[in-house]
Amino acid sequence: MPLPRQVSRKDADPGSGRHLVVYGGGGFFGRLVVRDLLQHTLARITIASRNPRRLDFGAHESRVQWTRSNFLDADSVRSVIRGADAIISCAGPYQGMSLDLLEACIRHGVHYIDVADDRDFVERAYRLGPRIEQAGIFAFVGCSVVPGMSALLARFASERVGGCDRVRIIISPGTKDTRGPASFASLLSTVGEELTVPRDGSRKVLRGWTERERVEFPAPVGRRWVYSVMDVADYVTLPQNLGARSVSFKIGSEMDILNRAMEMVRWIKSGLGPRMTNRLIPLMRRAIGFLGKFGTSRGAVMVEVTGPEGQRMALSVSRDSEGQIIPAILPSLAAGMVLEGELRTSGIVPLHTWVSEERLRGELMRRGCSLNYRTEPSSPWRIGPPGASPSGEGLELS
Ligand SMILES: NC(=O)c1ccc[n+]([C@@H]2O[C@H](COP(=O)([O-])OP(=O)(O)OC[C@H]3O[C@@H](n4cnc5c(N)ncnc54)[C@H](OP(=O)(O)O)[C@@H]3O)[C@@H](O)[C@H]2O)c1
């Protein structure tokens, strides 16, 4: 049901008095970020979007408020973020998206977190670094799975293999719960398009949704077919932050029929052009919505690092059900740490160092995720990383 401009609810959960604004908090991932924030912080949350719709947040509803606001409308953004402690942007797609929200945060001195995946968006945001620092705010740009969790897992793995020559990032989401239009637009943006990626210290040009490969995630996710796709920010952040000479990013559905359907989209796009492909988004969402009834909600992320001497270490974060919560964990954790004053230096937060391995592992375990490792693609996955205690405390690097 559409809501009028400002709707709040009253109940018995008073919260802490800290205030977060979540743009796109009613979208597929945004609502999971809000749910995680409600469970793990005491903040009041304002959900902002162009057409806010009522969602049920159960016992925490008193801490949630909805506001109609388009982030491209500077006056509306000013009135929404005024007095907020931080904003989280879950509004996408990030491909070609303006930096208006980040600019507004700089102007009004509000901490900023987003879930950007797109290389160009992240590069443009990084160019605002000096102004972000001057404003005395924190900016977490890309604080979700890629390039956020991938950066942390790549660092933890590279510390065990003595450096970071090559990084492979592989994601396999479940199909049971259909992602929002922005996620589909993001995925489709590079299907069939040329991508320039770092390989062996130089640049390789490939087409989106090619390089089909079978990989094995920890059970019960297991074997999945994956493809190179999307111009992810990791292609610049991992060479810059960890010195990686090769970076690859692959994704694939648990249902191979959907992977094959994307191959067809690649063909259609090369024949009919991107505008026609955008018209396919609602159709594809409906098709996946139907097929998803036969799918699971298992999801996993795997990051494999090869060190300078060829040693390998892969780390994987997975969840047996509701795997879609994995992308919501880092933005929520970052917001919680900002509210608790746990971060020190202002500016763009380096995605590979802001949280320790013990802390991340504990936060993942609190949310029902598993962390596994293996040293070779043929070796079995083990609960890990190596040297960590089962409780997530007292980790020792080997
Ligand atoms: N980096 C990662 O690893 C990662 C992981 C998962 C998702 N993502 C990204 O997260 C984004 C969201 O995905 P999703 O599946 O949740 O999409 P979605 O369901 O379509 O949600 C997008 C949300 O943004 C809001 N929105 C869009 N334009 C807006 C504007 N101009 N002003 C205010 N609100 C606006 C929409 O609400 P209204 O229509 O009401 O405005 C909606 O709530 C995608 O870009 C996806 O690629 C990144």
Image (cartoon, helix red, strand yellow):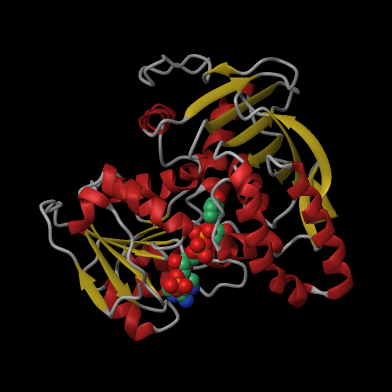
Observer-nearest residue: 238 or 10? 10
Q: Position of residue 134 (x, y in %)?
A: 36, 66
Q: What residue is at 83 percent from the left and 54 percent from the top?
A: 263
Observer-nearest residue: 278 or 392? 278
Can you tell which quarter of the image residue 47 is in?
bottom left
The mark tally for this picture is: 0
Q: Position of residue 48 (x, y in %)?
A: 35, 70
Q: Is residue 155 left or right of residue 32?
A: right
Q: Is residue 235 left or right of residue 326?
A: right
Q: Position of residue 43 (x, y in %)?
A: 22, 53
Q: Position of residue 42 (x, y in %)?
A: 20, 48
Q: What residue is at 42 percent from the left and 65 percent from the top?
A: 24
Q: Is residue 161 left or right of residue 194?
A: left
Tell me, yes or no, if residue 140 can be seen here. Answer: no
Can you tell which quarter of the image residue 71 is in?
bottom left
Tell me, yes or no, if residue 202 can be seen here. Answer: yes
Q: Is residue 31 left or right of residue 122?
A: left
Observer-nearest residue: 9 or 69? 9
Q: Looking at the rendering, in which quadrant would you find the N terminus?
A: bottom left
For residue 160, above or below residue 38 = above
Can you tell which quarter of the image residue 65 is in?
bottom left
Q: What residue is at 67 percent from the left and 58 percent from the top?
A: 287
For residue 78, above or below residue 178 = below
